[in-house]
Image (cartoon, helix red, strand yellow):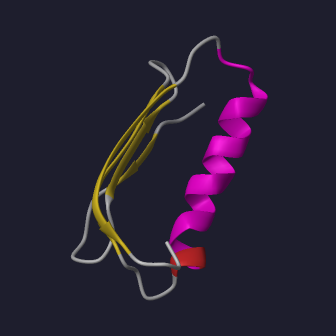
Amino acid sequence: MQNLLIEKTRSTPFIDFNAQTGCLRIKGESFPENAAKFYMPVLEWMDAYLKQKPEQVRVEFEITYFNSSS
């Protein structure tokens, strides 16, 4: 499975989901114009990854701000 890497923008966080290490990191601020559109690929990746039944998953959140739609 390929890793998911999304660089941060002014309104979206940095996302680094590494399938080999099982480390899922989200860092920054989240207030995208269309949160559903931005996060849909993230949720799809997570769903596919978790279906592989990984032995261990580490999730690191460092969100300094997020709006209600995020």
* Secondary structure mostly taken by the magenta-highlighted segment of the chain: helix
Residue 70 position in % (x across, y down): 49, 72
Q: Is residue 51 magenta?
A: yes
Residue 59 position in % (x across, y down): 45, 33
Q: Residue at x 74, y 24 (%)?
A: 52
Residue 46 position in % (x across, y down): 63, 43
Q: Quadrant of residue 25?
A: top left
Q: Residue at x 37, y 78 (%)?
A: 31
Q: Residue at x 32, y 61 (%)?
A: 13
Vertically, is 51 above or below 56? below
Quadrant of the drawing holding the N terminus: top right
Vertically, is 58 above or below 56? below
Depth check, front residue: 1 or 32? 32
Residue that extends furthest to the right in the rendered view of this protein: 51
Q: Quadrant of residue 54?
A: top right
Residue 10 position in % (x across, y down): 21, 76
Q: Is residue 66 magenta?
A: no
Q: Residue at x 51, y 72 (%)?
A: 38
Depth check, front residue: 18 or 35? 35
| Left or right: 59 in relation to 45 | left
Depth check, front residue: 69 or 36? 69
Residue that extends furthest to the bottom in the rendered view of this protein: 33
Vertically, is 48 above or below 42? above
| Left or right: 22 in relation to 6 | right
Numbered range of the magenta stretch = 37-54
| Left or right: 11 in relation to 45 | left
Tally the numbered discs.
0
Vertically, is 14 above or below 1? below
